[in-house]
Image (cartoon, grey):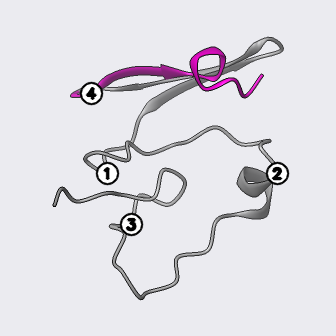
């Protein structure tokens, strides 16, 4: 099984341990700041049309692709 990371806190997700999501992120108002594949901090750009986030290892993720605009 591959390790996963919380995209808002960067902490490794461990079964049985609660890792709360920030309120703004739960409401869809905050873009992910960390890569959920490796936990690295991403470059994030927010605009009125949406956002994009880039991991140096795993590429670009955007709100249009995730339908979070």
The answer to whether 11 is drawn above or below residue 37 in the figure is below
Residue 49, which numbered label? none
User: Which residue position holds label 4?
Assistant: 58
Q: Give the magenta-colored segment's residue range.
A: 57-69
Asked whether, in this view, residue 20 is left or right of residue 60, the answer is: right
Q: Earlier in the sequence, mark 3 or mark 2?
A: 3
Magenta stretch contains residue 60: yes
Give the residue drawn at x 36%, y 58%.
5
Foreground label between 3 and 2: 2
- Displayed quadrant of residue 46: top right
The answer to whether 8 is drawn above or below residue 69 in the figure is below
Q: Quadrant of the C terminus?
A: top right
Does dot 2 land on a helix, a strand or a loop?
loop
Question: In the image, residue 18 lies at what x, y percent?
Answer: 52, 83
Q: Earlier in the sequence, mark 1 or mark 4?
A: 1
Q: Earlier in the sequence, mark 2 or mark 4?
A: 2
Give the residue drawn at x 75%, y 56%.
26
Residues at discs 3 and 1 in contact (Cβ within 8 Å): yes
User: Which residue position holds label 2?
Assistant: 27
User: Which residue position holds label 3?
Assistant: 11
Residue most extreme to the bottom: 16
Whole-number angstrom distance, CA of label 4 to CA of label 3: 17 Å
Whole-number angstrom distance, CA of label 3 to CA of label 2: 20 Å
Magenta stretch contains residue 56: no
User: Which residue position holds label 1?
Assistant: 39
> How many C-alpha atoms fall within 10 Å of the one at disc 2: few (<14), some, or many (≥20)?
few
Q: Quadrant of the N terminus?
A: bottom left
Q: Earlier in the sequence, mark 4 or mark 3?
A: 3
């Amino acid at each position: 099984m591959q390790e996963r990371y919380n995209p808002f806190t960067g902490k490794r997700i461990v079964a049985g341990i609660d890792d709360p999501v920030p309120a703004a992120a739960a409401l869809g108002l905050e873009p992910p700041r960390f890569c959920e594949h490796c936990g690295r901090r991403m470059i994030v750009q927010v605009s009125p049309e949406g956002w994009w986030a880039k991991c140096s290892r795993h590429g670009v993720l955007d709100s249009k692709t995730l339908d979070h605009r």
